[in-house]
Each structure stands twice: as C-alpha cells, then as structure tokens.
Amino acid sequence: MNNNHWRTPVVVLICGGLIMTLAMGVRHGFGLFLQPMTLAHGWGRETFAFALALQNLLWGAAQPISGLLADRYGAGKVLFAGTALYVLGLVGMALSTSGAGFALSAGVLIGVGLSGTTFSIVYGVLGRVTPPEKRSMALGIAGAMGSFGQFALLPVSQGLISGVGWLAALLILAVVAALMAPLSVALAEPHRDLSAGRHQQSAREAIREAFGHGGFNLLTLGYFVCGFQVVFIGVHLPAYLADKGMPADVGVTCLALIGLFNVFGTFGAGWLGQHFSKKHLLAAIYIVRSVIIVAFLAAPLTPWSAYLFAMAIGLLWLATVPLTNGIVAQVFGVAYLSMLGGFVFLSHQLGSFLGAWLGGLLFDRTGSYDVVWAITIGLGVLAMALNLPIDQRPVARLRELPA
C-alpha cells in the first residue's frame, strides 16, 4: 500500500513554497538589525556586514553539497537539518557578544542552514514532480511564495524590534523558522535513494558535462551579478536612506515593497519563461536593473523616489531565479537539478558575499556607498552580455532519448 499518495505535486508546491516563505522572509529582515545591533555592541558596520557576507558565501559553498544529498537521498532530511541549523543560528545571533560569535551564528550556521531550506532544494523536488510544460510556472509560484515572505515577515521583524527589542525579536524569529521542520515532510521523497542508481549519469559525470558546457558557465557567471546586486541593496539600502536623512520607516517600507513587488515579478518571470526565451528574459532583467539604479541615484531623493525604486527593483528582485533554474533543467534534465542549481547558486552567493561585505568595507573607508553603486550598475551591463550567447537546447544526451 502506498502511504505517500498525499504527496501530490500541489501539496509539494504549497509546502515547498511555505518553506521558502519562512526561510526567505526571516532572512530578508536581517538588514533591519544592522543599526541597533552595531550601536548596542559598539561594532563598526563592517563587522555586521562581514557576518552577512559570510552567510551568503557559505550558503553558496554548501549548496552543491546539500543539493547532491537531496538529489540522491531525497530532500526531507536535508530540509530538516537545514531548519535546525537556521534556528540555532538565529538563537546564536541573539546571544552573540563578539564579532566572532556573530560571524559563527549569523554567518556559518544560518549560511549552511539556508543551503538546506531554499531554492535549489525546493526547486529540485518541484522539477522532479512537475511535468516539463508546467515546470517554469511551478518554479515561479514557489519563488513568488518566497517573495511574499519577504513582504509579510519584514514588518513583523520591524515590529518585534520596536516592541520587544532586537534580542527578543531574534528569539521569536527562531521559533517562526522552526515551522519549516514539519513542512519538510511533504518534500521527503522517501524512495529517492532507491532511484538514484537508475540515473543515466553519476554525479561526477553530471558535473563534468555541465562545466564543459559553455552556456552553463555563462549562466553561472551572470548569476554572480544577481547576488551582488540584490544583497548589497537588501543589506545596505536602509542604512543608505538613513544616512541621507530619511526616517527609519522609509527603509523598512522600501524592503517591504521590494518583497511585495517581488511576488509579482517572480511569478511573472515563471509565466514568461514558459512562453519566451529564458536567456533573453534574463539579459533584459540585468540591464533594466542597472537603468533603474541609475535613475534612482540621479533623481532627487525623497521617500516617494525611494518607494518607486523599491517597487521597480522588486519586480526584478528574484525574477532571475525561476529562469536560471529553468535553463538548467531544460539543458541538463532534472536528475541532478538541485546539485547543478547549487553550483550556479554558489556563483550567486560569491557575488552576494562581495555585495554585502564591500558595501560595509567601502562605506567605512570612504564614508559613502557611491563606489559600490557604480560597481552594481556596471555589473548589470556585464550580466546582460553574458546571458545573450547561452545555448538553451537540451544537451545531446537528452535530445537522443526516445520520445
């Protein structure tokens, strides 16, 4: 008797989306803790920024390993372990009194925890349970649910900081993050280990095939830019606005608007990916981001100019994610989607590390974010150029399979 009949694609999509809602929603508010925590501990912004940069780096570095484990043995155990590390990291953030302790908790524990609870793991399961013609839309819906978490949990984080203080806020968010554990049951793939031996490739062969494919390398390099842009803005935008004399609630509202409009942008990207060239959509997203940033910096800064910037950049915030993972699935198949998506995501997180860290470092050195804004704009142009030549056709191995 099959006891897993309840794990339908719809159930997997809902539970996977809710996991991303919690994982991405809690994380999206970390920038709100920058000023109160650095003031309370007497740290420079570089100390806080380095921990979040390390988080992003280790999230990416651990992602291929987490992805391989999920591809081989099912995602449930990986999701559960990732949740445990995430929760421990939030508790550690609250209790840290030194830069090293903060880097260990916010950087190492949450970074590795995120690798087991976000895009590549959830998308790998969805890629396997969803028909190819519906895959891009399913990835878009899951991404949109993660985006909704960024919108919905951001005011919760700010309200907790204002109401009970940053330390208690982190402990409460740890309880919220723990809800991912029961949701992981729906994505358990209990028989995944039995099917691993029937893969047409070994993991090593899949890696060799991907890195020998020019389009995969271009896609990976372009994703570096995505990470740099979104994490620099997500971590440093509230502080940038406060430095310019904007009230604190403007930064909070901007992050909330990014999360809200990200819902529509990510869902829309998934829908568009079913009807148009994914690489052309990616190229357009990267160049339009740069145009939006230029317009934001050139216009007089007011609360409404900041809100318009947040809405516009929010539409493109995670719109790259379903398209990027969709190209990986389209070109290489879904057997090792979590692992290969993890390698691409590693590049994203290298960019995230530099975006978060350089933002703090160059601010402390120069007293402004001007240099990092300029780097962010230039990288968008580069990413557009990298995505245009990508070959999106399935590899010969898949084209030769019988219909």
Image (tube, grey):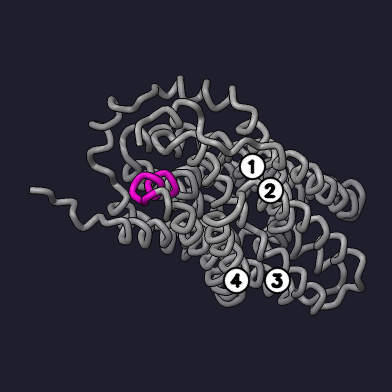
Q: Earlier in the sequence, mark 3 or mark 4?
A: 4
Question: Which structural element holds mark 1?
Answer: helix
Q: CA distance from mark 4 to mark 2?
A: 19 Å
Q: Which residue is mark 3?
A: 311
**Residue at the front extreme of this rendering:** 403
Tell me, yes or no, whether the two marked residues, 1 and 3, touch with CB atoms within 8 Å: no
- The answer to whether residue 308 is above or below residue 319 is below
Q: CA distance from mark 4 to mark 1?
A: 22 Å
Q: Residue at x 86, y 73 (%)?
A: 245
Q: Which residue is mark 2?
A: 226
Q: Please state the extent of the stretch shown in magenta in the rendering.
A: 123-131
Q: Which mark is residue 348?
A: 1
Q: CA distance from mark 3 to mark 4?
A: 8 Å
Tell me, yes or no, whether the two marked residues, 2 and 1, touch with CB atoms within 8 Å: yes
Crowd rating for badge 2 (residues with CA inside 10 Å; few <14, some 14–19, many 20+): many
Query: Label 3 is placed on what type of residue?
Result: Met
Query: Label 2 is placed on what type of residue?
Result: Cys
Q: CA distance from mark 2 to mark 3?
A: 17 Å
Q: Earlier in the sequence, mark 4 or mark 1?
A: 4
Count of numbered marks = 4
Q: Which residue is mark 4?
A: 260
Residue 122 locus on image (x, y percent): 42, 49
